[in-house]
Image: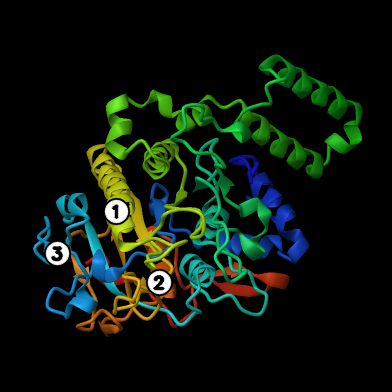
Amino acid sequence: MLTFLGPGEAQTCTGTTRRDFLQVGALGAIGLTLPAYLQAKQQAAPTSDDRSCIMIFNLGAPSQLDTFDMKPDAPSEIRGPFQAISTASPEFHLSEILPRHAEVADRFSLVRSCHHTSAAVHDAGWQVMQTGRIFSGGINTPHVGSVVSFLKGRKTDLPPFVLLPEPMGRGGGNLPSGQAAGFLGKAQDPFALMADPSQAAFQVPDLLPPQEIGTVRLDRRRKMRAIVDQAVSDFEASENAALLDNNFQAAFRLMTSTQAREAFDLSQEPTEVRERYGMNRFGQCCLLSRRLIEAGVRFVTINTFLTVFDEITWDIHGSKPFTSIEGMRDIVAPMYDQAYSALIADLAQRGLLDSTLVCNLAEFGRTPRVNPAGGRDHWPQCYTVYFAGGGVRGGRAIGASDPIGAVPADRPVQPGDVVATIFHSLGLDPEGTLPGPAGRPFPLVDSDFHPIHELFA
């Protein structure tokens, strides 16, 4: 889904931009007003305009006990089959299945005490982790990236919020995944790639004119529109016509933007760089996210997998059709470890890490005790999330689980705190509001939740 809203530099006598009117026009169906929109827009701190975010969502939910929160002194049915290894951070060890994470551990910080009270089904966890709220009362809370898109808008021809490679599929609970704009309206939905960037024939059809419509024909259509506009001069003199033209020009500029084409063109990357990330879907999505951030996209969400039902994922129940713990060790972890470490190193080398928050989230953790199939089941009571860049001080372990990784033992953190942390990094006030359904103020984050300030200390 593509948002055709341009920078909107033209202003009315009140200082309101045409883009402001376009935004509100797209949201008018749910009762939003221009004053409410402008008040919400002012929540963005002007000094943070260059901050961006890459959210990696570990669909399927990694086992905290086999990755980031090892319990080497626990009984074998708790600690699992893997050994803990030392890392570049003196504060924590990691699993042996993540050796490249260990090499960049001084760049990221763990939060080992995340938990929530939503249902232990995938899509319920997806929703709460990406919006900060449990889905209830029919209110579809917007994804954090959609909030950023709404409050900050785009910086370039590229969309402000991009989803790679495509939205999540089925999760088993028939609930919304949390990867849409919800009550903010479709204008703030992410641009979804809907393609596998690791494929040789990869391109982004929605950013390119149809093959049968070349640049010359597009230019003719623009000239034809100018003739029609002049023919209805009375209408053209109105503010509505000017706004319509601004919207059209933004759409035309995006479709013909060299910047947009180049940002999505992975063939411009040297082969050794692409191979460093891994020539697979997730690896190339991580590389593409770096290119998009570099080109001015504000928020990128990467789904490590698309569904828990049709592919090998972090969902290690241990028996088919789900993943075994050996499948996690041999397939999932190496792919993930390679791409993440390459992304962090690449951002740091290019001077982008300080201005780019990279957060790695999941819908829940896994049961402390290994099940009879040799895997672990769903466990929202305690799990690990982690953050790098965007002002985060790396190499730290914040919070702790109990001796078997079952519940938080120190500094409990909930999804609302995670969302507040993202807003804080991007310079948005978590105590601010959005114009919600029927125009009523809607808190960015509920008052019970706050940024994890220890990450930035």
- What residue is at 65 percent from the left and 73 percent from the top? 139
Is 452 placed above or below 205 here? Answer: below
Q: CA distance from mark 3 to mark 2?
A: 22 Å
Is 55 placed above or below 66 here? Answer: above
Q: Which mark is residue 104?
A: none
Q: Secondary structure at mark 3?
A: loop
> Residue 273's quadrant in the figure?
top left
Residue marked by disc 3: 83
Between 435 and 371, the residue placed more toward the observer is 371
Q: Residues within 10 Å of mark 3 (few under 14, many from 20)?
A: some
- What residue is at 33 percent from the left and 69 percent from the top? 375
Q: Nearer the viewer, mark 2 or mark 1?
A: 1
Residue 14 seen: no
Between 174 and 166, the residue placed more toward the observer is 174
Residue 113 seen: yes
Q: Earlier in the sequence, mark 3 or mark 2?
A: 3
Q: Contact, CB < 8 Å: mark 3 with mark 2?
A: no
Q: Residues within 10 Å of mark 1 (few under 14, many from 20)?
A: many
Percent position (x, y) of residue 310?
Answer: 51, 54
Horizontal relation, residue 301 to residue 287: left or right: right
Q: Which mark is residue 364?
A: 2
Q: CA distance from mark 3 to mark 1?
A: 14 Å
Percent position (x, y) of residue 300?
Answer: 46, 49
Residue marked by disc 1: 333
Q: Earlier in the sequence, mark 3 or mark 1?
A: 3
- The amino acid type of the residue labelled 3 equals Gln
